[in-house]
Every structure is written in structure tokens, then in C-alpha cells.
Amino acid sequence: MNTINFEIKSIDKIIASGITKEGSLVDQIYWVLRDNIINLSLPPDMPLVEKEIASIFEISKTPVREALIRLANDGLVQIIPKSGSYVTAISLERYLEACFIRTNLEGGCVKRLADKGISLSEQVQLKAIITEHKQIDESNTNPNSTYHNSPSYEINELFHRTLFEYAGIVGA
């Protein structure tokens, strides 16, 4: 039987990095928490205490509260009045739905590209993006960095945006 080992860390060890002097505090806190929820560093049902998070980042509770509200709107955090905020439990149904949508969007895009064909310059551009992505992944020295700001995230977004652009369905 396979076992999975989890290391339980305190929230200050999980989210201690990721805030910079650039951009909105709310956005930065939102992304740090979001990335850590999605990668399960902040596990389902974990309490997210505004005061504690604000203390970690040495800021007021207001930007933390606003970030938690955004996460609640995304379905990643549950805010229970007079109780607190908690990481939302993973919904298998929602996960399978997201996988279905992504698979069909990407599959439809690739099918459209196969039917339409792509130029030699488009092929060269896609190969260059793939090569750059491999180089970024191989040179990644900080696997715990905030993913949405990472070069790997950026190049992955560029790859998908380029595919959809070449397929003529940028809005998808």
C-alpha cells in the first residue's frame, strides 16, 4: 500500500515569502494565499486568521480581509461569520468539472490548429516557447516560490495564449 507523508507546517512558515513592495497588497496577499491553497500547502479546513496573517506580513488586517473575500468569491475560502475563515474543502465534483472544461478547451484548440494548420514561423515560435519552458523548469532553484509570479507560470501562460491566438480563438 502506498502512503503519503505530509509535513504539517505553521502558516507563518508557509506564507512567509511572496510579498514585495510592488503592486497592491491585496493582490499580493490574494496570490500568496491562492497559490498555497491550490498547491495544498494550506490544506482544506485550515483556519486563516486575519490577525495572524497580517502579523506575518507586518501589515494591517484590512488587505488580508479583502484578499480573503476575493478568495471566498473564487470558492477557495469559506468565511463563517463569528467563526472565521477556512480553506474550502476540495470538491471532487468541481475538480472534475474544471478538468472537463480545460480538456475540452485545449483539445478543441489543438483540433482547430490541426484542421487549420500553422505556418513555419508559428511552429518556430511554439518550439522556442517550449524550449524556454524546459530551461526555466531545469533551472528552477526555488520550488516554493509563488507560482503565479514565477517564470514557469508566465511561460506556460504565453504558450497557451499563443496556441489559442494561432487557432483564432483568443477569447476562449
Image (cartoon, grey):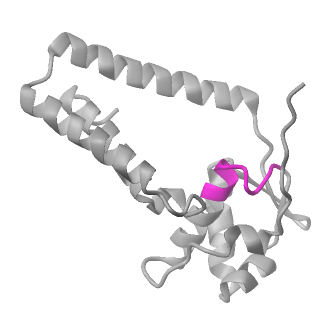
Q: Quadrant of residue 122?
A: top left
Q: Residue at x 61, y 25 (%)?
A: 97
Q: Residue at x 45, y 19 (%)?
A: 104
From this view, report whether residue 109 is shown above or below residue 115: below
Specify the quadrant that holds the N terminus.
Answer: top right
Q: Quadrant of residue 66?
A: bottom right
Left or right of 14 in this view: 8: right
Which residues make up the magenta segment? 35-44
Specify the quadrant that holds the C terminus.
Answer: top left
Q: Residue at x 62, y 67 (%)?
A: 67
Q: Residue furthest front?
A: 138
Could you tell me what secondary structure mostly forms the magenta stretch? loop
Left or right of 147 in this view: 63: right
Residue 109 in the image: x percent, y percent? 32, 22
Residue 86 in the image: x percent, y percent? 82, 58
Question: Depth check: 147 or 51 in front?
Answer: 147
Left or right of 105 in this view: 112: left
Q: Residue at x 23, y 13 (%)?
A: 114
From this view, report whether residue 59 is shown above or below residue 70: below
Q: Quadrant of residue 80?
A: bottom right
| Magenta span includes 158 | no
Question: Depth check: 84 or 117 in front?
Answer: 117
From this view, report whether residue 163 is shown above or below residue 150: above
Question: Depth check: 100 or 36 in front?
Answer: 36
| Magenta span includes 36 | yes
Q: Residue furthest left?
A: 120
Residue 43 in the image: x percent, y percent? 79, 52
